[in-house]
Amino acid sequence: MERKEFSAAFREFVRQNVASVEQVDVLLLLQSDPARTWTIPELSAALSSSNTSIARRLSILCARGLVKRDDSGQFGYVSDVAHDALVSELRREYGIRPTSVIGLIYSKRTSALESFSDAFLIGGDDRDR
């Protein structure tokens, strides 16, 4: 079976907005019921994670405009035509081929790390010397 490539828009969305698998889990849980809001302890319990880790993920998602914090300190998904289709695509792709999505999430870190380490190469870019 031929492996379908991710769309450029989807790859860019993930590159710009997703830093970890746990962040995907938080986003998809919130998006599954956009009318509901959650506290950090509720999300932590639902995802079997720590409050600190969930708070960190929520902070990133809020900064990206994908999640909002209300006046009572609860968090909910921000439905927006600009990203709803991409979040739905993330849900679909993560459900069908999670390994490929995880690879996409962490490949950006590898690329950034390689770019950083390349800055310290002496004598060109031949890594096999």
Image: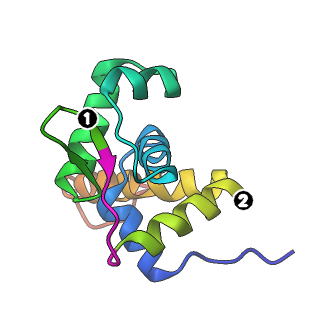
- How many labels were placed on the picture? 2
Residue 63 is labelled as none
Front residue of 118 and 82: 82
Residue at 36% over, 63% down: 15
Residue 22 position in % (x across, y down): 45, 37
Could you tell me the amino acid type at mark 1?
A: Gln
- For the N terminus, the image quarter is bottom right
Q: Is residue 119 above or below residue 84?
A: above
Q: Is residue 3 left or right of residue 14?
A: right
Residue 96 is labelled as 2
Front residue of 62 and 32: 32
Residue at 25% over, 35% down: 74
Q: Magenta segment range?
A: 76-82
Q: Earlier in the sequence, mark 1 or mark 2?
A: 1
> Mark 2 and mark 1 in contact (Cβ < 8 Å)?
no
Residue receiving disc 1: 74
